[in-house]
Each structure stands twice: as structure tokens, then as C-alpha cells.
Image: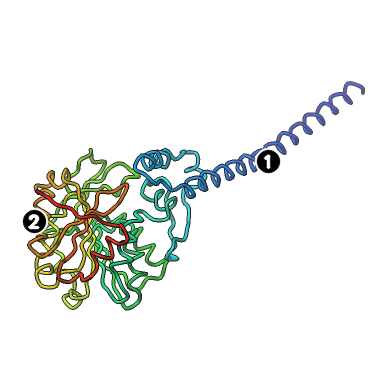
Amino acid sequence: MQAKALRERACIADNMASVVDEEVIVIVLPVSRAIASVALLAFHALLRIYRPSSEHLLIRYNRMVARYPRWLIAIHPRVDFVDEFELRFSCDVSNVMQRHLFYRGAWQHELISVLKLALEPGDVFVDIGAHHGYLALPAARIVGVEGLVFAVEASPAQLSVLAQSVVRNRLDNVVLISLAASDAASIGQIHQPEEGKEGAAAIVPNFEAAASYSVLFTDLCSVLPRSVWRRIKVIKIDVEGWEYMAFLGLSQLLATEPPALIICEARDDLLRMAGSSLEQLSSLLADFGYQPVHVHSLDHDDLAFVNTTRALGLMERLEAAQLVTSAAFN
């Protein structure tokens, strides 16, 4: 009897220990998640409050954002935020550009400032290489319901994200165009870099492509409605070295109804890989009455080309806001 009683007590003790272990596990898991959530919030707050004020500090900041802890990505793969235009974005934190958008409040603050000065309600904005709409969507707010934004994006995946943002923000004045801007109609290849760096997808890549896909190439003059040409105030183009070919396809528009301002990524190395150069691009636009200026940006090589006949007073406003300085090419 005593032996039986001892066995029963041992069994009860084992059951109690098992219950205690289960309770400890149940408690530890929420505590671990709570600690991780606090760490996540602290990390978010640190990077969102900090604003780099020099190129040196920006390089350090970019490294910090680029080294986003993988365990945080696993816990919280997406973050939502509302920008200054009350636009709602859902950012995939595994993507470098989307992390910058979340932490800095905009992908490129300087270009947003340029758009604020250049665009007015009722204007038309054309974004060539729109990516996820980091400029197209703010521009849609600036031009208002009477204005229009044409967002041109060759990547189906990026266009899908942009379309979701357009729907989420109920933007009825954004027209999505799925193609690659060029000088003539054809079928060509877009090359994709490693996951998380989709913004660098290129026709002539300077990286080892992780994937490639076929897209339609065509000149935008055959796509943009002739009825809106006169209202096109600003064109922004960032197509990783294919800018010269895209401008050739816009020649008729530039000759007849030149927009007041063109914002263009200016990387001579990428242009040369595609068979042109920064000097050639600047010369082409000069033939249509455009004067180049450097956009003050810490982390992106951009030029703005101001039309000397249509952009009355725009150059002065941009210079007064210390957003641009004059540029010249030999």
C-alpha cells in the first residue's frame, strides 16, 4: 500500500511539473514576443527620428537601414504608415527602398520638394520608371482631382504593388501604363537583381541578373493621349541608363508641347552601358530648349532640365528654395 501511495504521489508530482512547464512555456512565449515588439518599436523610432544632414551621416544611416535585423523581418514583415500627403503605404521591410520610404517618410525628399514647387492643381505629371509610386502618388495629391498622373512601369511585380497603393488610397487620377519607354515598338528583356533590390531592374544591367522577363518597349508619344500633351508640366524618368532612348521616343512631345520640367536620373556609367552618355542626353534636351541643373540630393544622382520658355519663374523658385544649382557639360 505504501509503495502504491508513493507511486501515486510521484505521478501527481510529474503531472504538476508538466503543468508548470506548460504554463512557463505559455508565459515565456508572450514575454519573448513582447520583448521583440518593444525592440522593434525602439528600432523603428530610432531610424524614423534620425535625419542625416550630410553625405557622411547618410552613408552610415543607409548602412544601418540596409542591415535591418532578419529576426525583425520575420516578426513584422510589413509596416504601415501615412505620409505627409495622407497617403497610406504598406511597406515590405525586406525591400531596401521600402524600408527607406518608411523610415525617412519619403524615398527622395528633395524631389518631393521640387514637385511641390513645379506642379499645380490641374497639371499632368508623367512618371517613367514609377516603381512603387513613391513620386507618382504624392504628385497625384498635388495635381488634385482635376489633374492626371501617368505612371509608367515595366515590371509587373512593381506595377502590382503600385496598383494596390492606388486602390488603397482611392486615387482616381492615376493612370497605370505597363511597358518600357523607348524609341520604337519592340519586345525586349528586363533584368532583375537579387530580391529586395527590385528598384535597380535594368534593360542593360550592371549586375548579375537573378531573373529576366520580356516586356513591351514603345515610344510614349504613341501612348500618351494627344489631348493632354499641353497640360504635361513635369516628366520624371529613372530607367537605369535607358533614359536617352526614352527621350528619343518623346521627341514629338518635346518639340511641340515641351513640359516645363524634366527630372532625370543622371548616371553616366549606366547611360554608357546602354550606348549613350550624359553629355549626349543633355545635348538632346538642349535642342528642345532645356537647361540642366543639379538637384540637391544626398543619396541620388538627379538632374532637372528646365524649359527656358515654358517654365517662367520656376528656375528662380527652385534656386530660392536651394533645391538646385546650375550644371554644365563639356
Number of residues whose C-alpha sits closer than 10 Å to that of mark 2, classed few (under 14), some (14–19) or many (20 or more): some
Q: Is residue 325 rendered to the left or right of residue 134?
A: left
Q: Which mark is residue 26?
A: 1
Residue occupying the point 72% across, 39% down? 23
Q: How many marks?
A: 2
Q: Nearer the viewer, mark 1 or mark 2?
A: 2
Residue 208, percent from left and from top = 23, 38
| Mark 1 and mark 2: Cα distance apart in space | 69 Å
Residue occupying the point 26% across, 68% down? 125
Residue 61, picture quadrant: top left
To which residue does mark 2 refer?
283
Q: Which mark is residue 236?
A: none
Q: Amino acid at mark 1?
A: Val
Q: Name the residue nearer the viewer: 150 or 21.
A: 150
Residue 165, picture quadrant: bottom left
Q: Amino acid at mark 2?
A: Ser
